[in-house]
Image (cartoon, helix red, strand yellow):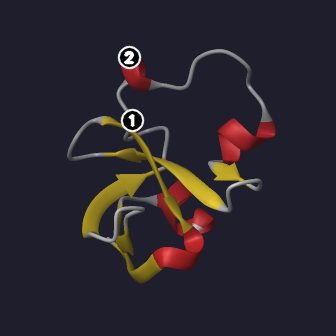
């Protein structure tokens, strides 16, 4: 998933914490993310890679909402690379 997200926009269907299903178009491709939404602060590997190993979640840029969101890997129902 991380490799696909770094290459292009992907569509992820997952279960939110409240039990709702969400479909999100998202990316980790820095060419797609607007410059004013680029990560700020520490340039840690976790931030660059989008992976939160403690929460087992992937932090991504939601291209629809134009903001950063995350989803837990274990709750993913469908993943499609665009």
State the residue at coordinates (26%, 67%).
22
Residue 56 or residue 8, whichever sits in front: 56
Secondary structure of the residue carrying numbered label 2: helix
- Please state, as top left, top right, bottom left or bottom right, where the N terminus lies in the image: bottom right
Which residue was labeled with disc 1?
A: 33
Given the current orientation, which residue lies at the most extreme left position? 64
For the residue carrying disc 2, how many other residues have a C-alpha within 10 Å: few (<14), some (14-19), or many (20+)? few
Query: Is residue 74 placed above or below 53 in the rendered structure?
Result: below
Q: Could you tell me which residue is drawn at 67 percent across and 37 percent down?
A: 47
Q: Is residue 76 left or right of residue 32?
A: right
**In the displayed structure image, the side of residue 58 where residue 46 appears, left or right:** right
Which one is nearer the viewer's eye here, 51 or 75? Answer: 75
Q: Residue furthest bottom?
A: 77
Looking at the rendered structure, which numbered label has been put on residue 36? 2
Please state the horizontal and vertical placement of residue 43, each as a whole percent of the image: 73, 25
Instruction: Name the residue: 27% across, 36% down.
Output: 66
Which quadrant would residue 32 be assigned to in this image? top left
Measure how far apart labels 1 and 2 are at the Cα level.
Answer: 8 Å
Give residue 67's quadrant in the image: top left
Residue 11, image x, y percentages: 32, 69
Local secondary structure at mark 1? loop
Picture disc at residue 22 = none
How many residues crowd around disc 1 within 10 Å: few (fewer than 14), some, or many (20 or more)? some
């Amino acid at each position: 998933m991380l490799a696909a997200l770094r290459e292009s926009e992907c569509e992820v269907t997952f279960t939110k914490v409240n039990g709702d299903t969400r479909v999100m178009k998202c990316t980790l491709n820095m060419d797609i993310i607007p410059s004013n939404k680029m990560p700020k602060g520490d340039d840690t590997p976790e931030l660059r890679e989008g992976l939160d190993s403690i929460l087992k979640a992937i932090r991504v840029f939601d291209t629809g909402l134009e903001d950063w969101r995350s989803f837990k890997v274990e709750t993913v129902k469908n993943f499609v690379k665009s």
